[in-house]
């Protein structure tokens, strides 16, 4: 069946519109060339194919409190909380939350460690002794190091854990060191509080 005249007319108008749009996109008119700055920006564009992610952290060093430890990769426990270091060396080894920020990237990188065990002090037993300005150094898988300076150390009841302050995204690279603190609850076998050191990238 042939098209009606109104249909043919509509098709012709649509074809003309497409032709006008294509003609307008062909090239800039005289006097409308792109600025040199824009061309320079295009030349400097780096494809994501060549992007190299920040290396993962493998070691933590805090001279002020005698910490020099490897870092386990931590995920999430079954209840949704962040895992704590496990295994035969869990008391002497800290862990990095791999689901979060890598140290040196914008955001809050989180490292957790035990404060003690039934046999004595653990890796973060002296975390509360850190003071403003103390240096924290993270060694990464490629051998590079990133340095942070402590801003403050605070204690929080576990029922009021400052989730936003610890995990919320930030524009600058931050580091959070977390351990247990406060009084020990023999009924649950856990401490009632957390001690957290807040640190920022140090130049």
Image (spheres, rainbow, N blue to C red):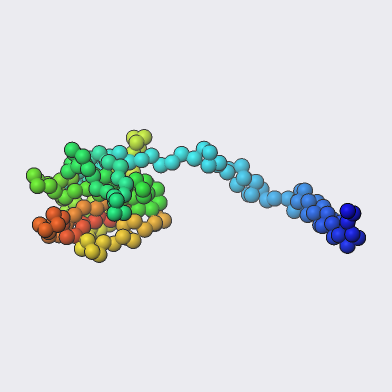
Provide residue 13's location: percent of width, then percent of height. 85, 59
Farthest-out residue, front:
1
Q: Left of 183 or right of it: where is 140?
A: right
104 or 3, nearer to the observer: 3
Query: How many callouts does the rendering have?
Result: 0
Name the residue rendered at 28%, 62% in the picture. 162
Camera sees residue 145: no
Provide residue 182's location: percent of width, then percent of height. 15, 59
Farthest-out residue, left:
119
Farthest-out residue, bottom:
160
Q: Left of 37 or right of it: where is 137?
A: left
Name the residue rendered at 31%, 54% in the picture. 80
Camera sees residue 189: yes
Name the residue rendered at 20%, 63% in the picture. 157
Provide residue 194's location: percent of width, then percent of height. 21, 57
106 or 33, nearer to the observer: 106
Q: Is residue 69 above or below residue 21?
A: above
Provide residue 112's location: percent of width, then percent of height. 25, 49
Name the residue rendered at 76%, 48% in the picture. 27
Q: Left of 24 or right of it: where is 61?
A: left
Q: Is residue 201 above or below residue 162?
A: above
């Amino acid at each position: 069946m042939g098209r009606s005249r109104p249909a043919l007319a509509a098709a012709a108008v649509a074809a003309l519109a497409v032709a006008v749009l294509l003609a307008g996109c062909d090239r800039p008119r005289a006097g409308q060339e792109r600025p040199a700055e824009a061309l320079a920006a295009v030349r400097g564009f780096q494809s994501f194919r060549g992007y190299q992610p920040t290396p993962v952290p493998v070691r933590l060093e805090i001279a002020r409190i005698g910490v020099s430890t490897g870092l386990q990769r931590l995920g999430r426990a079954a209840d949704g909380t962040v895992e704590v270091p496990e295994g035969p060396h869990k008391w002497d080894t800290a862990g990095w939350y791999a689901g979060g920020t890598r140290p040196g990237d914008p955001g809050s990188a989180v490292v957790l460690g035990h404060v003690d065990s039934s046999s004595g002090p653990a890796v973060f037993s002296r975390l509360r002794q850190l003071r403003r300005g103390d240096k924290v150094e993270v060694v990464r898988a490629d051998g590079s190091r990133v340095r942070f300076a402590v801003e403050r150390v605070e204690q929080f009841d576990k029922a009021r854990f400052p989730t936003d302050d610890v995990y919320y995204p930030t524009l600058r690279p931050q580091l959070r060191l977390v351990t247990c603190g406060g009084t020990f609850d023999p009924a649950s076998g856990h401490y009632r509080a957390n001690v957290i050191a807040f640190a920022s990238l140090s130049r």
